[in-house]
Amino acid sequence: MKDFWLSCGHHLTDRDAGGGLLVTDEFVKSYLARPELIPPSDACAAERALHAVLLADPRRRIAREEIATLFDADAQENWDLVIAFRDHLMQQSTLEVAYLDLVRHGVGKTPPLFLNQLVHLILRNVLDGCDDPFVLRAAELLFRPQRLTVHEGSLIAADDETIAGTGNAPLSPLVSMLGPPTEAEIDVMVEDNAHTYWERSDAFDMALDLTAGQRGLAKLGEVMTRWIKHMLAIDVEIEPVTEMRDVSFNWYLGLDAVGTQIGDTLWNGSSLDPRGQASVVGLYQLKFKDPTVVAEKIRSEPVYLILAMTPDKALHMKPQNLLTGLPVRHPELVN
């Protein structure tokens, strides 16, 4: 079996009998190795001692009073966030349960970076054994912001962080269109180069064609189907819709903030202006295989999912919306 996304740290976790991810000491230590938490050369003795004791015992209880003894205010804030996050993960049965609890009851001060890392890790578990690079690349949209452009008549999504990198390498036409210079060579994934994804999956340097009617949007639908199945134990079918004609938005779900705004506009009976229409990246129809899990008043109606980009062509997908916004009666985690 080919491996991928080694950077998410899935090899540092264990699985329970139901397939959920378990927190291990090694996984906690990976957070202690973050640059923000490694004491700098001018760190106070208390910070050095705190870091050392946690490396020796990653599960040790840390009182707020211990963190308050740190001299640097930024260090105190960093440690407050990480210890709170660590404690939350350890209090839950699996990382899937921990993530679901956060998005259902409020993320509080949890950094968005930590939430994206959890999605990255959980999706690695969801897609374990997947042999389709197009599905894996589509899954990146759930935890990596994208930058979009129209290139040779196609709507192309590339990793925003990769595009924002700097370097002196010659620019390809696609990179020039997407944004500032980057050291990475961006290739649009096609049949002929898809096999290279396995060796470069952690570089996030392959772009995906999200043109309506093409495979990119369909593969993203597959990812969302598997995400819902793993997290909520609910079987759904998700299919791209190529046009908004005759679409009844009795229940809709924005897959990002802009998509939610568009859904609100249409649900209220208003029409989209040209700018709003141009921002729509994808429209999906979601149907439940078991209608009894759905609220009775809309049981016979499909749910529409709206994916859209910002005016500056950024795409920030919110996978938590798929777990908190569906009209299901008793959503439960599979693990």
Image (cartoon, rainbow, N blue to C red):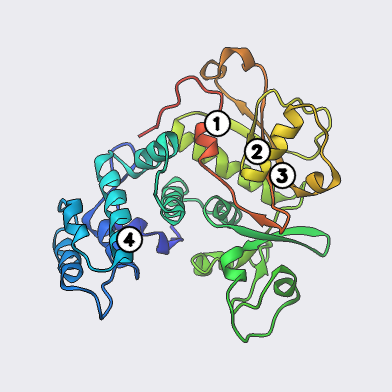
Residue drawn at the location 24% of the way across and 75% of the way down: 43
**Cα gap from disc 3 to disc 2, whole angstroms:** 13 Å
Q: Are marks 2 and 1 in contact (CB under 8 Å)?
A: no
Task: Say what secondary structure mark 2 lies in.
Answer: helix
Going by the numbered disc 3, the residue's amino acid type is Gly
Give residue 31's position: percent from left, percent from top. 31, 61
Task: Say what secondary structure mark 1 lies in.
Answer: loop
Vertical placement of residue 211 versus 228, above or below = below
Going by the numbered disc 2, the residue's amino acid type is Thr
Mark 3 vs mark 2, foreground winner is 2
**Cα gap from disc 4 to disc 1, whole angstroms:** 31 Å
Q: Label 3 belongs to which residue?
A: 282
Mark 4 vs mark 1, foreground winner is 4
Give left or right: position of 133 versus 76: right
Going by the numbered disc 4, the residue's amino acid type is Asn
Residue drawn at the location 59% of the way across and 42% of the way down: 222
Q: Label 2 belongs to which residue?
A: 260
Q: Give the mark nearest the N terminus, 2 or 1.
A: 2
Give residue 304's position: percent from left, percent from top. 68, 32
Which disc is residue 78 wearing?
4
Q: Label 1 belongs to which residue?
A: 325
**Cα gap from disc 3 to disc 1, whole angstroms:** 18 Å
Q: Are marks 4 and 2 in contact (CB under 8 Å)?
A: no
Q: Give the mark nearest the N terminus, 4 or 2.
A: 4
- Mark 2 neighbour density, 10 Å: few (under 14) some (14–19) many (20 or more): some
Tell me where residue 102 sits by quadrant. top left
Seen from the viewer's position, the closer of residues 171 and 91 is 91
**Cα gap from disc 4 to disc 2, whole angstroms:** 32 Å
**Cα gap from disc 2 to disc 1, whole angstroms:** 11 Å
Going by the numbered disc 1, the residue's amino acid type is Gly
For the C terminus, the image quarter is top left
